[in-house]
Image (spheres, rainbow, N blue to C red):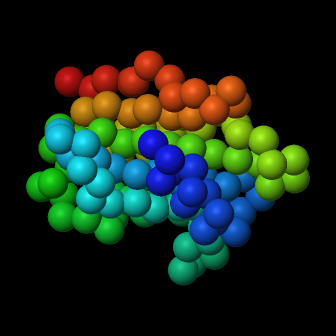
Amino acid sequence: MDLAIDLIERSSCNVRVAAVITDRTGRIFSWGWNHAGVNGFGECAEALAVRRVNRTRLKGSTIYVAGMRVRNGKFVPSKPCQKCQKLLEAVGIKRVFYLIPTRDWTVPIEYS
């Protein structure tokens, strides 16, 4: 999912993360990147992508998460944090792919 990799540039964090959500047919309908929230605390890319869309669209969808370290420009394992994993499962996202340092997508984490 090249869009997730491209969206990394929108983040201003030291470790930049972006997320793209697709429906069952692969059509992109939401995206987000990590950033400092309005209260000064960071907001994860996955949480922003979920917040930006009508939750009924999330049932059965897939999310792609990519991350890069600014200091050296290398991709980092971008598995969602525990808080985001719980959120993704709660809103009905079915599959989670995340980028690993070799720039490959992992076998998906699947939620029932």
Q: Residue furthest right?
A: 71
Task: Residue 56 in the image: state x and y as whole percent.
Answer: 12, 55
Residue 100 is left or right of residue 91, and the answer is: right
Quadrant where the N terminus lies?
Answer: top left
Q: As displayed, is residue 108 above or below residue 8?
A: above
Residue 94 is left or right of residue 84, and the answer is: left
- What is the tally of numbered marks visible in this picture? 0
Q: Residue furthest front?
A: 2
Residue 93 is left or right of residue 39, and the answer is: left
Q: Quadrant of residue 112?
A: top left
Residue 107 is left or right of residue 90, and the answer is: right
Task: Residue 99 in the image: state x and y as whole percent.
Answer: 57, 34
Q: As displayed, is residue 108 above or below residue 80?
A: above
Q: Does residue 24 appear anywhere in the picture?
A: yes
Q: Residue furthest bottom?
A: 38
Q: As displayed, is residue 99 above or below residue 18?
A: above
Q: Residue furthest left?
A: 56
- Depth order, front residue of 26/54: 26
Task: Residue at 33%, 50% (x, y): give it.
Answer: 21
Q: Quadrant of residue 97?
A: top left
Task: Residue 49 in the image: state x and y as whole percent.
Answer: 38, 59
Task: Residue 65 in the image: state x and y as whole percent.
Answer: 50, 43
Task: Residue at 80%, 55% (x, y): give it.
Answer: 70
Q: Does residue 42 appear anywhere in the picture?
A: no
Task: Residue at 29%, 54% (x, y): give it.
Answer: 28
Q: Quadrant of residue 25?
A: top left
